[in-house]
Image (cartoon, helix red, strand yellow):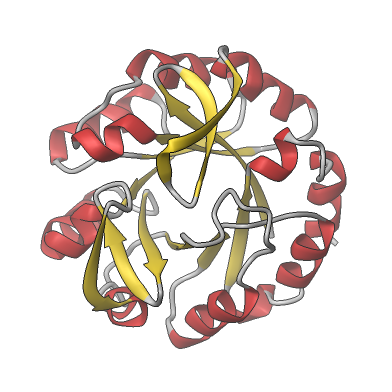
Amino acid sequence: MIVFPAIDLKGGEVVRLAEGDMDRATVYGDNPAAQAMIFAEAGAEHLHVVDLDGSFAGRAENREAVEAIVEAFPGYVQLGGGIRDAKAVEGWFNLGVSRVVMGSAALKDPDFVKQMAREWENGIVVAVDAKDGMVATEGWAEVSDVPVRDLARRFEDAGVASLLFTDIGRDGMLKGCNVDATVELARSVDIPVIASGGVKGLDDIHILSLHADDGIEGVITGRALYEGKLDLATAIAMANR
């Protein structure tokens, strides 16, 4: 199982939000590239980066920070946030991003996302962000009437690399990952699932790793790392057992 340390970008700074609320951002640093290197030195081979401003604007808002991260980090960078057209997708892949995460576009224009998945083999991740079981979009500012499982199943056999499932109510809250909902989703589709939202310590990593055979490909963790509640090197070792 892959452990993805997270770097969320707001105004060029490294932040974490509480429940996806931009007004509840905690700043953890002003040098995203340096943070990427810290994660690399702890053994991370994958990184999850989100342009939070871009999620709301629908376009790249932290391009310089992302470019610096990609240049500094020796592993694979997975990027999300406001990526909603073919030009943006191509631009990020050409820059060196390994995977592009699409959320709002997956709900509003699934045919486009499927097209991108065909053009960029193993490069497109569909974000399935849940609030009370329903899909949320536009930086989680809007909640749809589409159940999470229904959206996920639209991408069966579409060639997407993974589903990124986030329980918004737990994100950045250190409440523990919603393992039951994540595993239930993984078992219901034939697409690998990445868990996100609420990781608070090694117990979450251990429990999720036990469900790798159910389709759990990885887990994203942010605040637990920044606040010293989870040691990245130990988490990676546990996930690889």
Residue drawn at (37%, 35%) of the image: 52
Residue 132 location in percent, x, y?
40, 75
- The quadrant the N terminus occupies is bottom right
Residue 70 location in percent, x, y?
49, 22
Image side of residue 21 versus residue 235, left or right: left
Above or below: residue 98 compared with residue 173: above
Q: Quadrant of residue 149?
A: bottom left
Residue 28 location in percent, x, y?
63, 24
Residue drawn at (23%, 77%) of the image: 146
* Residue 150 visible in the shown view: yes
Q: Quadrant of residue 36?
A: top right
**Which residue is more in the foreground, 51 or 194?**
51
Residue drawn at (77%, 72%) of the image: 207
**Which residue is more in the foreground, 23 or 5?**
23
Q: Residue furthest front?
A: 23
- The quadrant the C terminus occupies is bottom right
**Which residue is more in the foreground, 174 or 154?**
174
Q: Quadrant of residue 99?
A: top left
* Residue 82 visible in the shown view: no
Residue drawn at (59%, 64%) of the image: 217
Image side of residue 164 versus residue 124, left or right: right
Above or below: residue 155 compared with residue 235: below
Above or below: residue 137 compared with residue 96: below
Residue 219 location in percent, x, y?
62, 57
